[in-house]
Image (spheres, grey):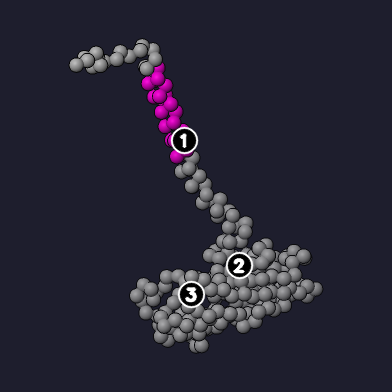
Amino acid sequence: MDVGNDRPVPMQPGHDVADVDATASDNRVTLRKLLVVTVLMFGFGFALVPFYEKLCDVTGLNRIVKRDDHKPANTQVDTSRRITVEFDANLRSNLPWTFKPLETSVQVHPGEIATVVYEVSNVAGRAVTGQAIPSYGPMLASQFFRKIECFCFDKQEMAAGETRQMPIAFVVDPSLPSDVNTITLSFTFFEVAGRAQAGIPLATAAAPAGVAAPQSKIQ
């Protein structure tokens, strides 16, 4: 038996110890970097909240859920201009409804209050709740389009087979830039949780002809 192979190999002074120290130092540096990255990511997550809110304010996206109480600065009707307002309707998430504007476009003077009616029908054999989300073209038009009454202010709960006509009353701010002559208002309905999904039956006695209750809100 070759006992020489069982002898421990002596450490080389100043070499392996230095390697161990260097590795430990590298590990500490890496750990500090990971901690810094973690803190930065945590802080960035919080910073995204006000950034997103500011982005929504700038682009007008906040108007889908936030009431806009700012009335047009000029309450006089500008008869020297005519703005064409086009209306569009869309459905998402396999929502079992039909949805359309009864008028696809109207012409209005800035400062003039106008009303257009949308018709929606629930073709499903169950109660369904939807939420309408508006969008505008061009996007900057959202800053000058004031919705006085709109079905998009609230969830719409539709009984099975129900058909409802829902108005939107609006005014175009007279301060709308002069190079904007056409505004497209598009509504997209999404299915959302409602009372029916929570097991609460919808009232069988709805408003006549299913017309949504008037709302005096400015958006």
Is 55 or 95 nearer to us in this picture? 95
SS assignment at label 2: strand
Which residue type does callout 2 highlight? Ser
Residue drawn at point x = 58 percent, y = 72 percent? 187
The residue that mark 2 highlights is 135
As drawn, the residue found furthest toward the left would be 1
As drawn, the residue found furthest toward the front would be 1
Residue drawn at point x = 56 percent, y = 82 percent? 119
The picture quadrant where one finds residue 115 is: bottom right
Give the image location of residue 47, x and y in percent: 52, 47
- Callout 3 crowding tier (Cα within 10 Å): few <14, some 14–19, many ≥20: some
Give the image location of residue 46, x and y in percent: 49, 47
- Identify whether 142 is placed above or below 4: below
Residues at discs 3 and 1 in contact (Cβ within 8 Å) = no
Q: Is 39 in the magenta?
A: no
The residue that mark 1 highlights is 36
Is 89 or 106 nearer to us in this picture? 89
Q: Nearer the viewer, mark 3 or mark 2?
A: 3
| C-alpha distance separating marks 3 and 1 | 46 Å
The picture quadrant where one finds residue 35 is: top left
Residue drawn at point x = 48 percent, y = 73 percent? 94
| C-alpha distance separating marks 2 and 1 | 40 Å
Is 191 or 165 nearer to us in this picture? 191
| C-alpha distance separating marks 3 and 2 | 19 Å
Q: Which residues are magenta?
A: 18-38
Q: Which mark is residue 195?
A: none
Which residue type does callout 3 highlight? Leu
- Callout 2 crowding tier (Cα within 10 Å): few <14, some 14–19, many ≥20: some
